[in-house]
Amino acid sequence: MALIVQKYGGTSVGSPERIAAVAEKVMGYRQRGDDVVVVVSAMSGETDRLIKLAKAICTNPDPRELDVLLATGEQATIALLCMAMNDRGCPARSYTGQQVQILTDSAFNKARIQDIEGARVRKDLSEGKVVVVAGFQGVDELGNITTLGRGGSDTTAVALAAALKADECQIYTDVDGVYTTDPRVVPNARRLDRITFEEMLEMASQGSKVLQIRSVEFAGKYNVPLRVLHSFQEGAGTLITYEDESMENPLISGIAFNRDEAKITVLGVPDQPGVAARVLGPVADANIEVDMIVQNISPAGDTTDFTFTVHRNDYDKAMSIIQAVAKDLGAREVSGDNKIVKISLVGVGMRSHAGIASTMFKALANEGINIRMISTSEIKVSVVVDEKYLELGVRALHDVFQLDKAS
Ligand code: ADP
Ligand code: ASP
Ligand code: MG
């Protein structure tokens, strides 16, 4: 008998019929003798609907109140799923994040899980019940409802699996595993049987939304066996695992992309010690995350240029901060572009191979795609290109590295 934590995403619980199908699937595991804890998302579209509703009331909803609102989406699904199971003769109980005591910090809208009090869940399991927990939400030490950021139900599931020492955490979704890239963009993308935590973390950080970044971090840290599977199709899915010697290390495991990018450039900043801190410090102070940074010296050597990227939602705010900073510093010009995207190649095999970046650049050049920024790490190469080239760029790279074929 195993203890399994299963998470069902928004589309998988998107209608009464699908909730009923999930109920029956969970009952199948119970009948085989497994203990099951289920984590569910809000029904598909519900979180977006609630955000829109809040924005119809005011442009900048109070973050605490927004979390109170967003948490209702998942609360509805847990109740509906338990009703479906109870109606079919399978005892099930629902819990909100607050009831299970998913303790988080107080960073509303992007809270981090700090601890889980699993006693209530364990007691129900020992009584033969299925436990259904609302994903994406927790409670801070003052009793405020918090949410974990978009896609956060993945993290609830992995954190619960770690706290309960579950045998496996299964993420059920609308694709049958992790692919070489988003199959919606590249139809001949290939499902991976396995991918390392390190690569999955990089794919998630570079924009692949199949798993929330924090869920992969948790799984790696607490050694939770993690699998991505299709909710309603049979198959082994993709196992996220440690690198081991039996695994072949393909050069490139996948291509991630991020549509939420924007870049800002400051030209002609007097080149003195401390200037980078003076340009970027105020951006960080405003809680805006900066991703890529490029600094370049001007030909004359007395001024320097900066370009950096931020999340598209932060573009206007970052731009007005930088305009004020540029004026203070006597910089020549500020410009920006919020119609850019980032495409990244990810693979642990890159460590031991030269030439990946140049093959990437050539493939993009062959399609007439101009590269605006480049950044590399041990296991990834990222480029920033104009938004209109996203699909073309990803497909060209998928082809040139032959990711549709198993290596
Ligand atoms: P859920 O609502 O179940 O959490 P998500 O929409 O968050 O589902 O994640 C699943 C989606 O992730 C897929 O429909 C797919 O379009 C997208 N996706 C992006 N990159 C990948 C990838 N490399 N492999 C598989 N799916 C991916
Ligand atoms: N419902 C939340 C969202 O749409 C959390 C999740 O689905 O994981 O982002
Ligand atoms: Mg998701």
Image (cartoon, rainbow, N blue to C red):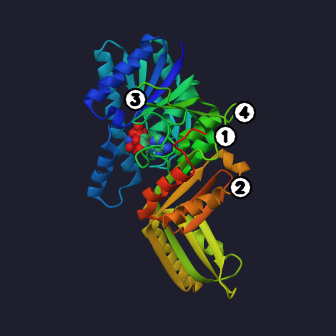
56 left or right of 199?
A: left
Task: Say above or below: 149 vs 229.
Answer: below
Residue 288 vs residue 255, the one in the foreground: 255
Q: CA distance from mark 2 to mark 1?
A: 15 Å
In this rendering, does residue 181 appear at all?
yes
Q: According to the image, label 1 marks what residue?
A: 249
Task: Of the two numbered discs 3 and 1 on the same chain, state the one appearing first in sequence.
Answer: 3
Task: Of the two numbered discs 2 and 1 on the same chain, state the one appearing first in sequence.
Answer: 1
Q: Position of residue 31 (x, y in %)?
A: 42, 11
Task: Say above or below: 177 vs 288.
Answer: above
Q: CA distance from mark 3 to mark 1?
A: 29 Å
Task: Of the two numbered discs 2 and 3 on the same chain, state the one appearing first in sequence.
Answer: 3
Tally the numbered discs: 4
Q: According to the image, label 2 marks what residue?
A: 354
The crowd level at tag 3 (other Cα within 10 Å; few <14, some 14-19, many 20+) is many
Amino acid type of disc 4? Glu
- Quadrant housing residue 330: bottom right
Q: According to the image, label 4 marks what residue?
A: 245
Please name which of the two marks, 3 or 4, marks the residue nearer to the observer: 4
Residue at the bottom extreme of this rendering: 300
Amino acid type of disc 2? Ala
The crowd level at tag 2 (other Cα within 10 Å; few <14, some 14-19, many 20+) is few
Q: CA distance from mark 2 to mark 3?
A: 40 Å
What secondary structure is marked by label 2? loop
What secondary structure is marked by label 4? loop
Mark 3 Cβ inside 8 Å of ligand 1: yes
Task: Of the two numbered discs 3 and 4 on the same chain, state the one appearing first in sequence.
Answer: 3
Please name which of the two marks, 3 or 1, marks the residue nearer to the observer: 1
What secondary structure is marked by label 1? loop
Amino acid type of disc 3? Ser
Amino acid type of disc 1? Asn
